[in-house]
Image: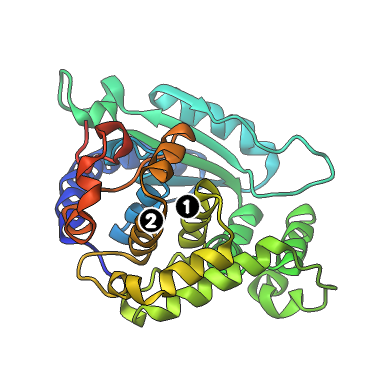
Amino acid sequence: MIIPGSFQAAYAAERAVIAEVREIAGSNLRTLCADHQWLFADRLKDEESVLARLQLGDCESIGDLPDFYGATVIVPTKNQLNDATDSVIALFDNAEVKKERNFDPRAFPYDDVHVRAQLGRSAIRPGDNPVQARHFEIQVRTGLQYSWWWATHDSIYKGGVQEWRAHRLASQVRASLELLDDVLANLGPTSRLQANRPSDREEDYRALSELLTHWSESQRPIDVRRFCETVLVYADKSEISVGDLVATVEEESNADVVGIPGITPAQGVFIAVYRVVGDPLVAALIAAGRRVICSPEMCEACPGLLTLEPNACVLLTGK
């Protein structure tokens, strides 16, 4: 996907901070896992993943992203989950388990243990510095949970088409993790054994995924689901249907939003909708606790964005 030049600079600056967080936190976690014969994996979000997350508008700045650095501790069975979680929390200042989202005993969504932490005093450099303050996440999983996540991450979590039958099968697999790895490795084909129950949201995702065909393949996002979620917020806050949103983008007067250098597809859609709805769209986003990336490239294409208040914009600098 196309990455705006202004964002590349901001990403590089923040990545330097997070890389130091990774060096310190990762070293401590690797030692912990080696001592207990647990497995360990970690990653830094790439440019597109960070940009897609910020486009969602629920972070005040790039420095507030809670999982720019993420790690996973993998234990053999559920018997080790509590001990592993307690051990991880003991390593870092202000570490705590994120509240579980699933309280329905009949449902089996993705909701592994997530620990959010800061380096705090465990940072090498003394005094107040961004390395100490940055948040990061550690997920604690069993081996089978990790296998399930790996097998479903791209097709279910990041896919643009949200099919009921695919989600249904993934929940069945998660509820009975004893199923063979072959089922997880062939989740898409096996899901077609399910009777389909398409929803309106499924059609919305399909329409928005097809909207991306107006952009060249190199400009399209890898994370189609995040694009759809971001654009659905614009439709909701503008009080227009997905069909009307697609029609707005496809109008001849908005032909310029496709392929503008430095403008992502989600940003192009925002500009097209903003040209019709105007500031009430921004006001609705602010009321919902969301913001917009007002990059120089966007403001050049849509000068009206230059008048937005600072609290409406996602900052591309860490605090």
Determine whether, in the image, residue 65 is placed left or right of residue 131: right
Q: Is residue 299 above or below residue 165?
A: above
Q: Residues within 10 Å of mark 1 (few under 14, many from 20)?
A: many
Element on which disc 1 rests: helix
Q: Position of residue 162 (x, y in %)?
A: 64, 65
- Residue found at x 26% / y 64%: 263
Q: For the residues carrying marks 2 and 1, which lies nearer the camera in this image?
A: 1
Quarter assignment of residue 91: top left
Q: Is residue 11 above or below residue 103?
A: below
- Residue found at x 42% / y 45%: 281
Q: The N terminus is located in which quarter?
A: bottom left
The residues tagged by marks 2 and 1 sit, at their Cα atoms, a distance apart of 14 Å
Tell me the number on the disc at residue 52. Answer: 2
Quarter assignment of residue 290: top left
Residue 38 vs residue 99, the one in the foreground: 99
Earlier-in-chain disc, 2 versus 1: 2
Element on which disc 2 rests: helix
Amino acid type for the residue under numbered disc 1: Tyr
Determine whether, in the image, residue 90 is placed left or right of residue 279: right
Residue 130 vs residue 140, the one in the foreground: 130
Q: Position of residue 66 (x, y in %)?
A: 39, 38
Question: What is the count of numbered marks?
Answer: 2
Query: Which residue is label 1 attached to?
Result: 234
Amino acid type for the residue under numbered disc 2: Ala
